[in-house]
Image (cartoon, rainbow, N blue to C red):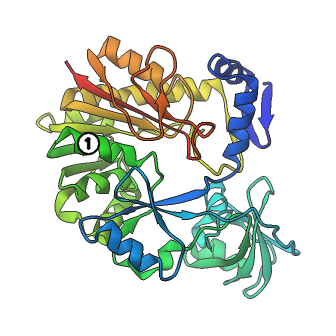
C-alpha cells in the first residue's frame, strides 16, 4: 500500500487524493505541519457552578499567566511555550502515543503510559520518547523501569524539559477543588449550542471522559452519560465528582448503539454524538497512520450512533475531532436523506463553513485558526 508521509502523519494514497478534492497540496502540507505543533493557547473551561471566570482568573494569575477568551465567557487560556531543545541522555523510556503527546507538552509520565523502560532505575536521567522514537522530553525516573511495567500505577518520570510547555494544571489546588476542566476551544462549542437550545435534558451517547457532559451539567441541563465500558464510565464519574456535578449526571454503562432497543422509554431533548473517529484534528500529533478503509469503516460505525440519536431526541449535536469528509459532512448528508433530519444554521466563534453539500456544518481548521481540527453540526428531527 502506498502512503504519503507528512513527517510521521501517514495517509494512504486514496485518502490523500480524496482530501485533495477539498484542499490544495499546499494547504494539506500546511495542515499536517501544524498538526505536529500544539496550538499556542492551552484552554480550560471554568466550572461556573462553583466559581466565576473572573474569580478563577484572579486565583490562577497568582501563579501562572492566564487570560480570558474573547468569545466564550467560561473559557480561559494559558500561553504554550516552546519549542525547546531537549537534552539527550543514555536511558530511554518509551511512552504510549497519547501519553507521549502529553509529555511533549510538559506533563509528567505515569506508569500506565509506559511501553518500555529497559535498564532504567529510580533516579536515572531519562529521555521520554514516542513509540516511533521521537524525542519528547528529558526528566528523572521516579521508579525502576520494571516497576513501571509491573505496577502500572504512580508517577514514572518527572518531566524537567519538554519540547513544548504548558503548566501542570492538574497539580493546582484549583483543579482539585473542581474549579475548571481542561477542554479544547472548539469542543466547548457543543455546550454553547446546547445552552442556546434552552433544553433541560440531554443524552451523551459517547460521554467519556465527560467534558461535554459536565459542560451541559454546569448549565443546569440534566444529562444521561453513556459509554460502553466500566473504565470509561468510571472516568466520567471521577470528573463529575471532582466538579461537583453528580446530581445532574446519570451514568449508564452500555453500548449506545442499542439504547433505543434496550431502553425504549429513554428520551431527551438533545442527543450528543461524538463518536470514535480517525482523530486527524488532534494537536499535537506525533505520529498517525490512516487509510481510506479506516475512514469508511468508522463512518459506517458513526452512522449507527446517529440513527439511535434520531430516535431518542429531537435535536442532535454531532461532533468529531477529525478532518475527513466521510466522517463529517457526508455523514450529515446521509442523516438528512436516510433519517429525515434537517441541518440547522449555527455560527460558533472562529469557525468556517463545512465542505461540499453541507455549508451549514461548521469546522475548526488549524490553517484558519490556531486551534485543533474539529467538526460540528446541529440536526433536528422534522
Side of 318 where 200 appears, left or right: left
Hey, which residue is sitting farthest front in the picture?
70
User: Which residue is nearer to you in this view: 292 or 22?
Assistant: 22
Please report the residue visible at 49 percent of the width from the left and 27 percent of the height from the top: 327
Tell me the SS state at disc 1: helix
Please report the residue visible at 70 percent of the width from the left and 39 percent of the height from the top: 32
Q: Tell me: residue 120, above or below residue 330.
A: below
Residue 378 spot, x, y in % from top left: 32, 30
User: Which residue is nearer to you in this view: 375 or 80?
Assistant: 80
Residue 79 spot, x, y in % from top left: 59, 64
Please report the residue visible at 40 percent of the width from the left and 79 percent of the height from the top: 59
- Residue at which label 1 appears: 194
Mark 1 residue crowding within 10 angstroms, few (<14) / some (14–19) / many (20+): many
Q: Tell me: residue 95, above or below residue 372.
A: below
Side of 99 where 77 appears, left or right: left
Side of 206 where 36 appears, left or right: right
Please report the residue visible at 81 percent of the width from the left and 57 percent of the height from the top: 133
Amino acid at each position: 500500500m502506498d502512503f504519503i508521509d507528512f513527517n510521521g502523519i501517514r495517509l494512504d494514497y486514496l485518502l490523500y487524493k480524496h482530501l485533495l478534492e477539498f484542499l490544495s497540496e499546499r494547504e494539506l502540507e500546511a495542515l499536517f505541519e501544524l498538526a505536529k505543533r500544539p496550538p499556542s493557547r492551552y484552554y480550560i473551561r471554568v466550572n461556573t457552578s462553583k466559581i466565576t471566570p473572573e474569580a478563577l482568573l484572579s486565583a490562577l494569575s497568582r501563579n501562572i499567566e492566564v487570560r480570558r477568551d474573547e468569545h466564550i465567557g467560561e473559557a480561559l487560556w494559558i500561553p504554550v511555550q516552546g519549542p525547546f531543545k531537549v537534552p539527550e541522555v543514555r536511558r530511554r523510556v518509551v511512552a504510549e502515543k497519547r501519553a507521549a503527546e502529553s509529555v511533549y507538552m510538559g506533563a509528567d509520565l505515569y506508569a500506565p503510559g509506559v511501553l518500555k523502560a529497559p535498564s532504567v532505575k529510580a533516579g536515572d536521567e531519562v529521555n521520554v520518547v514516542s513509540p516511533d522514537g521521537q524525542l519528547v522530553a528529558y526528566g528523572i525516573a521516579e521508579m525502576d523501569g520494571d516497576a513501571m511495567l509491573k505496577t502500572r500505577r504512580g508517577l514514572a518520570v518527572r518531566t524537567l524539559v519538554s519540547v513544548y510547555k504548558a503548566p501542570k494544571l492538574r497539580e493546582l489546588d484549583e483543579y482539585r477543588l473542581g474549579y475548571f476542566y481542561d477542554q479544547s476551544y472548539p469542543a466547548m462549542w457543543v455546550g454553547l449550542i446546547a445552552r442556546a437550545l434552552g433544553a433541560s435534558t440531554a443524552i451523551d451517547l459517547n460521554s467519556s471522559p465527560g467534558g461535554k457532559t459536565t459542560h451541559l451539567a454546569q448549565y443546569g441541563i440534566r444529562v444521561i452519560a453513556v459509554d460502553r465500558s466500566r473504565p470509561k464510565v468510571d472516568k466520567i464519574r471521577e470528573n463529575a465528582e471532582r466538579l461537583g456535578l453528580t446530581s445532574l449526571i446519570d451514568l449508564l454503562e452500555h453500548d449506545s448503539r442499542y439504547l433505543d432497543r434496550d431502553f425504549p422509554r429513554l428520551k431527551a431533548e438533545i442527543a450528543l454524538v461524538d463518536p470514535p473517529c480517525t482523530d486527524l484534528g488532534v494537536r499535537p500529533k506525533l505520529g498517525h497512520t490512516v487509510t481510506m478503509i479506516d475512514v469508511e469503516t468508522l463512518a459506517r460505525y458513526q452512522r449507527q450512533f446517529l440513527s439511535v440519536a434520531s430516535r431518542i431526541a429531537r435535536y442532535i449535536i454531532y461532533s468529531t475531532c477529525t478532518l475527513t469528509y466521510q466522517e463529517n459532512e457526508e455523514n450529515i448528508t446521509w442523516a438528512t436523506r436516510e433519517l429525515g433530519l434537517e441541518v440547522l444554521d449555527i455560527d460558533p466563534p472562529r469557525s468556517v463553513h463545512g465542505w461540499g453539500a453541507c455549508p451549514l456544518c461548521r469546522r475548526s481548521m488549524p490553517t484558519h485558526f490556531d486551534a485543533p481540527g474539529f467538526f460540528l453540526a446541529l440536526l433536528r428531527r422534522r
